[in-house]
Amino acid sequence: MSARRRYWLMKSEPDTFSIDDLERVRTEPWNGVRNYQARNFMRDGMQVGDGVLFYHSNTDVPGIVGTATVASKAYPDETQFDPKSDYYDAKSSREEPRWFLVDVAFERKFKRTITLDELKQHAGKLGEDFALIRRGNRLSVLPVTAAQWKYLLSLE
């Protein structure tokens, strides 16, 4: 018996790594996450085959721009061990890594961005547990229910 497919929303700044970048490279390690809750979602919650909504953040028009798939189990983020990396963590060791990541594989780019403003207009249908539009939520990795996933894809 296989585990039930789960769904996630993962944020990236398009100037750093965009949906077009993912389309070009096809699969990418989702490195640099330095929030424990977001790390736990990747390390403990994500499974190969889970669906990902790719969200462009910190841009003029933030929003969902495409879909991807979780392509690997969680494994240690190598950037935590590199003193030259912006994501270096001196308290982390190979024996006891603090930070984990998953590989994410491109699925498709949307014809249009489902903007944050539009998402807020659909708050009632998405429900209170849709963390992206909850005030003060800044996590870069968020769980999405199957119903929310289906509804969000219908907005495209």
Image (cartoon, grey):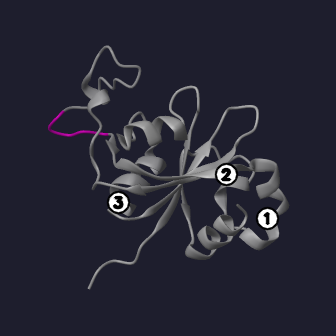
Q: Which residue is mark 1?
A: 123
From the viewer's side, name the closer residue of 22 and 95: 22
2 or 1: mark nearer the eye: 2
For the C terminus, the image quarter is: bottom right
Residue 149 falls in which quadrant of the image?
A: bottom right
Give the percent coordinates (x, y) of residue 60: 76, 32
- Disc 3 marks a residue whose amino acid type is Asp
The secondary structure type at the circle numbered 2 is strand
Residue 89 falls in which quadrant of the image?
A: top left
**Looking at the image, do the residues carrying marks 2 and 3 touch, with CB atoms under 8 Å apart?**
no
Whether residue 97 appears in magenta in the rendering, the answer is: yes
- Disc 2 marks a residue whose amino acid type is Lys
From the viewer's side, name the closer residue of 102 and 69: 69
Residue 127 falls in which quadrant of the image?
A: bottom right
For the N terminus, the image quarter is: bottom left
- Disc 1 marks a residue whose amino acid type is Ala
Give the residue drawn at x 60%, y 46%: 55
Q: Earlier in the sequence, mark 1 or mark 3?
A: 3
Give the percent coordinates (x, y) of residue 111: 67, 51
Q: Which mark is residue 78?
A: none
| 112 to the left or right of 87 | right
Q: Evaluate whether residue 127 shows in this view.
A: no
Give the class, few, some or many, for how many residues have Cα within 10 Å of label 1's Cα (few <14, many ≥20).
Answer: some
- Distance in Å between CA atoms under marks 2 and 1: 22 Å
Residue farthest top in this picture: 84
Give the overall secondary structure of the magenta segment: loop
Q: Earlier in the sequence, mark 2 or mark 3?
A: 3
**Magenta region: which residues?**
94-98
Q: Which residue is mark 3?
A: 44
Give the residue drawn at x 62%, y 76%: 147
Give the percent coordinates (x, y) of residue 15: 58, 26
Q: Which mark is residue 111?
A: 2
